[in-house]
Image (spheres, helix red, strand yellow):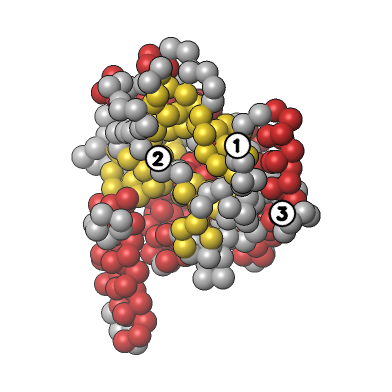
Amino acid sequence: MADGRSPLEEEIRRRIEVGGPMPVAQYMTLCLTHPEHGYYTTHNPLGAAGDFITAPEVSQMFGELIGLWAAAAWRAMGSPANVRLVELGPGRGTLMRDALRAAKVMPDFRAALVVHLVEISPILETLQREAFIASDVPLTWHRSLADVPEGPLIVIANEFVDALPVHQAVMCADGWHERVVKIGEDGDFHFSIDRDPIPLFDRFLPGNLRPARIGEIFEWRSDQMALELSRRVVRSGGVALLIDYGHVQSAIGDTLQAIGGHDFVSPLLAPGEVDLTAHVDFQALVRAAESMRARTHGPVEQGEFLRRLGIVERAAALKAGAPHEQATAVQSALLRLTSSEPTGMGRMIKALALSAPKLGPLPGFDDESR
């Protein structure tokens, strides 16, 4: 380590010195998933002692409702006898643990389950194994969705897509240039642009975004994950539920952010030591899914989705007869999960479901399926 720099920062510097400025997507990939020094490889990011808190950590109600949603989706699939319940990026296992507890009200569903957890973090996998040490449901761990056996599946992905690498392009006088990370004259990392414009980039952009102003930024992710997920859903007659921060329509804007210690920090400081995310373009997800003949449901705001699933009624049941402090905590969690404030979880986070074409409306999307 030189000048207090982390091993990952040293490696990124070496790569830039040899290969030139690094695309934002490559920088994000290294920061999060480097096999030795990546954030998810070396950190437990969740909870009060971590860097952020996700919806399952806010309240048991979230995971319970997702479990009941999965059971209803299973019924819609025709109640297959052997179904793979898959979670992408399961954190500490909180969502799945709460979902399986709620699923006890449908013993036939629970008996049909084999749980598959897709996790790249050794630290989080250890926590998940501890969380399920007494589970009576078969569980298997994988590094990617491709490793999950073929067959009927229900996929849950809560705040997973926002951590996938995002590319950025900047509008310049001569067209769109990919945004890159370089080493400045001061020796620090800085954002810059690639020397040459991206060929024919305007044809790639949604039509309403083509008259962008100089300096504006457009973000996009590879369709690989969405295409693979949609293929599996269609082929298996299954469903997938994606819940994440993002926008319903493709839009101009820089949403790349870093979070450390529950606060926003610069994405270019302490690579590998802070979480990097960018908002999800749900229109792009829908487009990719429908290109594979998947049926899409939503997206809808998380607050509305949870209300349709019965979170208000569940909160009332938990508060009934509970001590004042516990009842207050339940109400606080309800408000946090469903908040419609501009930066509230209930408004900023969206839910989107994918299904095989033959499936009808799904819970929470009754008025939104197409």
Which residue does the numbered mark 1 point to in the structure image?
182
CB under 8 Å between discs 1 and 3: no
Image point (42%, 29%), residue name: 170
Residue type indicated by callout 2: Asp
- Quadrant in which residue 204 is drawn: top left
Image point (62%, 41%), residue name: 185
Element class at badge 2: loop
Left or right of 75 in this view: 303: left
**Quadrant of the rendering where the N terminus is positioned:** bottom right
Which residue occupies the foreground of this view, 127 or 139? Answer: 127
Image point (65%, 45%), residue name: 187
Which residue does the numbered mark 2 point to in the structure image?
254
* Viewer can see residue 130: yes
Work out how far the residue at label 2 is from the one at label 3, CA to CA, in angstroms: 26 Å
- How packed mark 3 is, by other alpha carbons closer than 10 Å (few <14, some 14-19, many 20 or more), is some
Residue type indicated by callout 1: Lys
Relative to 217, residue 45 above or below: below
